[in-house]
Amino acid sequence: QVQLAESGGGLVQAGGSLRLSCAASGLTTSSFVMAWFRRAPGKEREFVARISESGLFTYYADSVKGRFTISRDNPRSTVNLQMNSLKPEDTAVYYCAAGRGGDSQAPYNYWGQGTQVTVSS
């Protein structure tokens, strides 16, 4: 059974940092593009960042570029999202996903349950 389990969310002040982790089980993560999406209150779930199977290529939404960094550790089947200079508009539930890649949700077959990130002003 495939499971993606996010951790590391919480409450932080604006300008602060958080590091999210996603632990995968039941799949060979090196065969998948791994991504982070988020859903803010009252909004649709949106793409945040993705990383290629090898970890060589990364892509970010414009809203987080320069502040967030995605990384992966294939032997440990984990994906991380380092979030710096957080803003109140980053408040959302953050989801880890595994799939074929891209910025839309459809190519991602597997999803975690999400972890809440709240940024206070």
Image: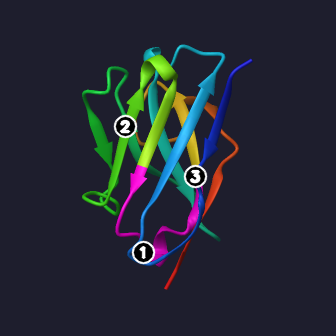
Q: What residue type is labelled 2?
A: Ser
Which class describes the residues within 10 Å of circle 2: few (<14), some (14-19), or many (20+)? many
The residue tagged 2 is 71
Identify the amino acid type marked 1.
Lys
To which quarter of the image does residue 96 belong? Answer: top right
Q: In this view, does 38 lie to the left or right of 81?
A: right
88 left or right of 62 in image: right
Q: Mark 1 points at which residue?
A: 87
Q: Which of 106 and 71 lies nearest the eye of the viewer?
A: 71
**Residue 44 at x, y = what percent?**
58, 59
**Kind of residue at disc 3:** Gly
Q: Give the range drawn in magenta.
A: 82-94
Quadrant for the N terminus, please: top right
Q: First in sequence: mark 1 or mark 3?
A: 3
Image spot of residue 114 (x, y percent): 65, 49
Residue at 58 percent of width and 52 percent of height? 8
Return the mark for residue 8.
3
Q: Do the numbered discs 1 and 3 sit on residues whose CB atoms are within 8 Å?
A: no
Label 1 to label 2: alpha-carbon separation: 21 Å
Question: What is the CA distance from the residue labelled 1 to the residue labelled 3?
Answer: 17 Å
Q: In this view, does 57 lie to the left or right of 36?
A: left
SS at mark 3? loop
Q: Earlier in the sequence, mark 1 or mark 2?
A: 2
Q: Where is residue 60 in the image (x, y as percent from the top left)?
A: 32, 49
Asked if residue 89 lies in the magenta stretch, the reply is yes
Q: In this view, does 77 lie to the left or right of 116?
A: left
Q: What element carries label 2?
A: strand
| Crowd class of label 1 (few under 14; some 14 to 19; many from 20; radius 10 Å) | some
Magenta stretch encompasses residue 85: yes
Q: Is mark 1 on a helix, strand or loop?
A: loop
Sequence-wise first label, 3 or 2: 3
